[in-house]
Structure formats: C-alpha cells, structure tokens
Image (tube, grey):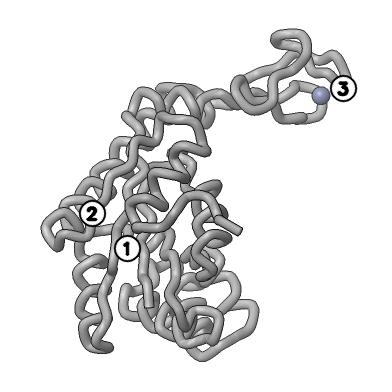
C-alpha cells in the first residue's frame, strides 16, 4: 500500500497533478472536500455525523474526518494505496493521521510538496477577470480574452472582483501558508517530505513528483 499526501498552497496546481498521479499510480485521489460531499450525499453514519456539526456551524472534529477517511481507504479501489489531498491541513491533524495509520500498521510513505513561492501564488490566483455584463470568466495565463480588457462574447469590459484582487488574495494566503508550513515541518520531521519545484511547466512538475516516488515518469510499453 502506498499512501501519499499531496501538499501545496492554493494555486500550486495540486488538482492537475493529483489527476496525473492517480492515472500513473493507479490509486485513487481522495480529496477531503469530495469525501465529505459523498459521505453526506450517501448519508453514511459518519457522513450524518459530519453533517450534524456542519449544520450547527461547527468545524467537523478531526476524529470524524479520520473515520471518513478510514471508510474510504477500506474500499477495494484503495487497496494499493491512495493520494490524500486536503487532509491533513494542520500539524495536529497530521499527528492524528499518523497515529491512526500506525494503529493499522501503516504510515504515510511520502508527503509531496508542490512548492511555489507566495509571490507567484498571488500572481496566479489574481489572474481572474470577469465580464461586467454576464460574468464570463477569463484568466491572464489560462484563458485570455482576444482583446485585452474586453469580453470576447459580448464586448463588455472585464473587471476584477474584490476577492480576486492581489491584496485580498495575499491576506487570505498568509494564514493558509502558516498551516501548510506546519504540516510541511511535520513531514520533514518524519522523513516523508519530498519537495518539488512547482514553478516549472506542468509536465516537469509531474515528472518530479513521480521521480520522488521512485516511479518512471513515462509509461514504457
Ligand atoms: Zn461576457
């Protein structure tokens, strides 16, 4: 069983890389957000419990999240392992996860950090512009409008929402990066941490992640 934790700040490209790893390693990508939504939709006992906290406006206790994870890891498609994404999010959660896994004679084999400096994250995350008329979405890197500042579809001006402005994003990132750093420090201490430069092209980041796991980046027929 190979248990991998994928770490990275918002904007680091975790979602893209998780899909590549899932495909190449043949183990499921388990994003905590999806896990919650599925457990609640399927009304599993632990899903109902999580929901009672959420309905009360409270944080779901780590123990509940770990039980949800336990249920998920027990399914056949995760027999060979899984890629965890979104949990652990704090050092306390990382320690709880370690003790839970130790109880099953297991452990996190690798914590892969897609490392992108804060300035580059702000730049990536603040690239979103929407058109004033209908909210069509553009991005300076991924999806530019043909004429700068003008919507391709209706010609209305592109504006940036307050949430997408660099100062707002930077402020939001600060606390997220603190938590991430604590988790990174945890896995550095356990020896599971592998750091991959996330500024390189997507394909190189994928290759770096696979290399860190000792897997050949390209499938050989
Ligand atoms: Zn538009």
Q: Position of residue 63 (x, y in %)?
A: 31, 79
Q: Secondary structure at mark 2?
A: strand
Q: CA distance from mark 2 to mark 1?
A: 14 Å
Q: Nearer the viewer, mark 2 or mark 3?
A: 2
Q: Residue furthest right?
A: 154
**Residue at position x 20%, y 65% in the image:** 92
**Location of mark 3 (residue):** 153
15 displayed left or right of 7? right
Q: Residue furthest front?
A: 221
**Location of mark 1 (residue):** 88
**Residue at position x 49%, y 31% in the image:** 201
Q: Earlier in the sequence, mark 2 or mark 3?
A: 3
Ligand 1 under 8 Å from disc 3 Cβ: yes
Quadrant of ligand 1 in image: top right
**Location of mark 2 (residue):** 193
- Camera-nearest residue between 221 and 42: 221
The quarter in which the C terminus is drawn is bottom right
- Camera-nearest residue between 23 and 43: 23
Q: Are the two marked residues, 1 and 3, in contact with CB atoms closer than 8 angstroms?
A: no
Q: Nearer the viewer, mark 2 or mark 1?
A: 2
- Camera-nearest residue between 9 and 44: 9
Q: Position of residue 114 (x, y in %)?
A: 37, 43
31 displayed left or right of 88? right
**Residue at position x 64%, y 23% in the image:** 129
């Amino acid at each position: 069983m190979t248990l991998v934790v994928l770490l990275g700040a918002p904007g680091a490209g975790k979602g893209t890389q998780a899909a590549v790893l899932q495909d190449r390693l043949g183990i499921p990508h388990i994003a905590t957000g999806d896990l919650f939504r599925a457990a609640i939709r399927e009304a599993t006992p632990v899903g109902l419990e999580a929901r009672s906290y959420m309905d009360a406006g409270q944080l779901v206790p780590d123990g509940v999240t770990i039980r949800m994870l336990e249920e998920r890891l027990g399914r056949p498609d995760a027999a060979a392992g899984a890629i965890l994404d979104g949990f652990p999010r704090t050092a306390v959660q990382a320690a709880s996860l370690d003790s839970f896994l130790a109880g099953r004679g297991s452990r996190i084999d690798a914590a892969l950090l897609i490392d992108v400096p804060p300035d580059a994250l702000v730049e990536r995350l603040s690239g979103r512009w929407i058109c004033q008329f209908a909210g069509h979405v553009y991005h300076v890197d991924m999806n530019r409008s043909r004429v700068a500042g003008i919507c391709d579809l209706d010609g209305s001006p592109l504006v940036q929402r307050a949430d997408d402005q660099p100062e707002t994003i930077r402020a939001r990132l600060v606390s997220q990066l603190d938590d991430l750093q604590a988790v990174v420090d945890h896995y550095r201490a356990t020896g599971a941490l592998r750091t991959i430069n996330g500024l390189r092209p997507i394909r190189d980041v994928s290759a770096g992640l696979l290399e860190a796991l000792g897997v050949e980046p390209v499938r050989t027929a």
